[in-house]
Amino acid sequence: MTMVDIWEIVETKLLGEFKLSAANKKIQLKIEYDIPCDSGSGDVEIGMVSRLEDLPARVRDLRVIGDIPKIRQVLRNLVSNAIKFTPEDGSIILTVSYSAKEMADKRKGKFRRLSVFMEKIMLKNGEEIQAIPNGYFQLNVRDIGVGMNEDQILRLFGEGVQFNANDLQAGRGSGLGLFIAKNLVLRHQGKLSALSEGIGKGSDFKLQLPLYQCNVTPTIEESICGEEECVSESSSKYERRQLSILVVDDVETNRKLLSRLLERGGHQCHMAENGEVAVKMIQENMSTSGGDEGLYDCVLIDYEMPVLNGPNACQQIRDMGCDVFIVGVTGNTLDDDVQYFKSKGANVVLLKPVNLVALENLFVEYGL
């Protein structure tokens, strides 16, 4: 993964790449910004941005974190399709916008994130950066081409789907472009969707990608050892109830140390040496309590364990109908490993060593 200057890619590289293709069909290809300029004080907007240089620094410095070639592949696919299906003398408008809000997202379980927190991210070159999620980038690609009906929109991102291929593509193309693009966007935790008012009325493709404020300097101690003062400092900022936490780790010293630190923060801890034991404990507690969460408020579970690892344990916990808040813990920095953990049922994944302040912040953010 790398820090991607998405603003620069769209205005310079993307427009430059397709300028000739659009001109050959006498298509007007232009970019618009739906982002307000900052006033001198930075509080009141004084009009809309008209070019890249006018972007407010608070927005211009935000980055997408991901794979540059894959992101450019998605962007090229959207613009290429728009040119392909827009008739001569038509127009295509790329509208760039920014939202400070988080993208709406349906998560497993009933917990929703209420605010943002600092994340550690390992880049492709081995550099570790501090980053804070900060809204999302949005690109709308609107054309006046052939358009789509409701049935076509529903099937649009399916594998091998093509519409009017013989008439509009001369029979060429595999129909995999949008299918692949959609999956690439999902891998970047983004969204790709399409709208159309009907056949002959053009299409509007909307791409959303999360943005980050990068290279943030942490202001707290990040080691798991000696974090007692940090936990006390964090806990003093707001009232919180005592939580019942199940700590699952096959290394006994890790279980005991983490439990001791959490208990010093006012929580009650239980321990399990692997995923199988944890699943049995949760199942027993669900039977005792008669609820879908059992007696635990949170399960803190390691990835690599014998007998039953963390992701598979999460899957079994969710299959039982348990909505307990699950925090996965892993030493694997690859995004695929983190996403796999989440796909199995973890609400959040933290990297080792566990940052207790970040963990306590999660409890507040998710309303525990």
Image (cartoon, rainbow, N blue to C red):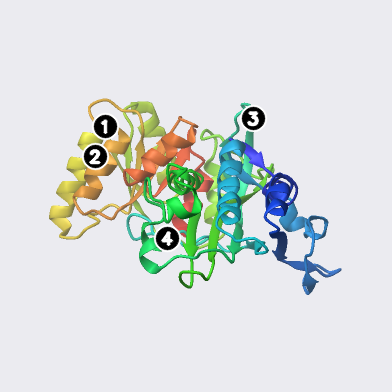
Foreground: disc 1 or disc 3? 3
Number of residues whose C-alpha sits closer than 10 Å to that of mark 4, classed few (under 14), some (14–19) or many (20 or more):
some
Q: Earlier in the sequence, mark 1 or mark 3?
A: 3
Residue 118 visible, this angle = no
Q: Which numbered circle lies on residue 274?
A: 1
Residue hosting label 4: 112
* Disc 1 and disc 3 in contact, CB within 8 angstroms: no
Foreground: disc 2 or disc 3? 3
Find numbered disc 1 in the image and state the secondary structure of the residue it sits on: loop
Quick one: 127 or 267, which is closer to the camera?
Answer: 127
For residue 103, above or below residue 279: below
Give the alpha-carbon distance from disc 1 to disc 3, as whole Å. Answer: 32 Å
Residue 41 lies, in percent from the top left, at: 83, 69
Residue 37 lies, in percent from the top left, at: 78, 67
Residue 213 lies, in percent from the top left, at: 66, 49
- Look at label 1 and name its amino acid: Asn
Residue hosting label 3: 127
Residue hosting label 2: 278
Find numbered disc 3 in the image and state the secondary structure of the residue it sits on: loop
* Disc 1 and disc 2 in contact, CB within 8 angstroms: yes
Residue 58 visible, this angle = yes
Q: In the orientation shown, which residue stands out farthest toward the left?
A: 287
* Disc 2 and disc 3 in contact, CB within 8 angstroms: no
- Look at label 2 and name its amino acid: Ala
Q: Earlier in the sequence, mark 2 or mark 4?
A: 4
Quarter occupied by residue 260: top left
Is residue 139 found left or right of 163 in the rendered image? right
Give the alpha-carbon distance from disc 3 to disc 4, as whole Å. Answer: 30 Å
- Look at label 4 and name its amino acid: Arg
Quick one: 277 or 184, which is closer to the camera?
Answer: 184
Give the alpha-carbon distance from disc 1 to disc 2, as whole Å. Answer: 6 Å
